[in-house]
Amino acid sequence: MNPNSPSLLTIFLVFLRLGCTSFGGPVAHLGYFNEELVKQRRWLDHAAYANLVSLCHFIPGPSSSQVGLGIGYSLAGWRGAIAAWLGFTLPSAVLMTLLAIGVLTDEKLFNNDTIHYLKVVALAVVAQAIWQMSRTLLKGVLSWVLCVVVAVVVVWLSSVWMQLLVLLAMALVGLLLFKPEDISLNVDGVNPSGARHWRSPLILGMFIFFGIFLFFALAGWFFPSDILALSESVYRSGALVFGGGHVVLPVLQQEVIANSAIDTDAFLAGYGLVQAVPGPLFTFAAYIGALWVDSSPLLGALVGIVAIFLPSFILVPSVLPVWQRLQYNRSARGALAGLNIGVIGLLVAIFANPLLTTTVLSVQDAILALIAFAVIFYAKLPVWVLVLGVLILGWI
């Protein structure tokens, strides 16, 4: 652990506040992280943050949660990763568990207007984050043109696999068009010595990653139980899904139907509820687990939430040293620069569709989004204050 890093308690509390106020889905979460952790606290710089975001778009799992986990891991190792993940995940996981066991089923936490205006605030956060990253990482006319091309392609051909192909293409374009000596590499927050020792964690991580697949399959075959069936289904969903929470929800629905574990109406009710709570959408696994193991809903929720995030805990620390090592390879810097451009273009595309198209439904929405952007960008008001204000107005 770097002596200049924040304490584990600070990491936990900062991510806990983010977990309580980060509405709007994975892309909005990245905006909140950028504002709080990069711009305000300077726990890492824009280049290191963009590289981490690039990595988390290449590996399966929840991209925003993996970014938070990776930041915690870079700051304080495994303990930092756990502190960051626990803080960001806990609020949503607790809410979804309570909703599943019926504690809050008769109370409407958020009315429709409140949810909508929270999405408008999240839209402003995403716009501010994209602007900040663009000013830092897009150098020259060519970078801006490539960014626009990526955004247009992703909007036009909207699929998770197309996003991955575009990022791979941008890595190749960067390798061919950007000269390493022309690229300014800022690696603040990256441990050079740790970046060199990458083979052992990568091999061990892949062994554990696939070993857990085999374990759950064999254990479920020889010792059938609700807990093992839940663990196997949810782990597989978290390990094989690219694109984050919006993609894993339909996959989980297929798993639930295949196992006849949860009533379809109950699943769809939870599907809607998870959109209204802050934090990662993957906490829907807590809701599923609580209903799947109805004889012990708290245990089911705990198993569900651990199983769906377990692949991320294996993959991020395993692959991160390789990713960091590439930053010290001059021949790879061009590819990383191209990736950064691709990530910004991808964020612009997602901002345009579906965020903008499903959030700004009236002139009033557009005005509110512009006011929120101005408050964040010019008045420097913390995002959580805006979120709290919207919640209070909605409840009133």
Image (cartoon, rainbow, N blue to C red):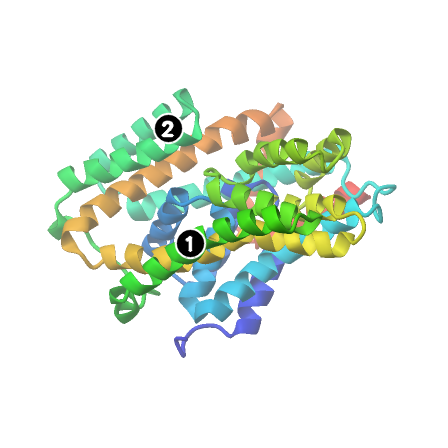
Is 250 above or below relative to 299? above
Q: Residue 374: where, in percent of width, then height? A: 52, 43
Image mark for residue 315? 1
Image mark for residue 162? 2
Q: Residue 279: where, in percent of width, then height? A: 61, 49
The residue depicted at 53 percent of the width and 54 percent of the height is: 310
Quarter holding the N terminus is bottom left
> Which quarter of the picture shows residue 70?
bottom left
Name the outermost residue toward the top.
Answer: 156
**Residue 355 falls left or right of residue 161:** right
Q: Residue 328: where, in percent of width, then height? A: 20, 59
Secondary-structure class at tag 1? helix
Secondary-structure class at tag 2? helix
The residue depicted at 59 percent of the width and 56 percent of the height is: 88
Q: Residue 237: where, in percent of width, then height? A: 54, 41
Is 365 above or below relative to 98? above
> Three-letter amino acid code at disc 2?
Met
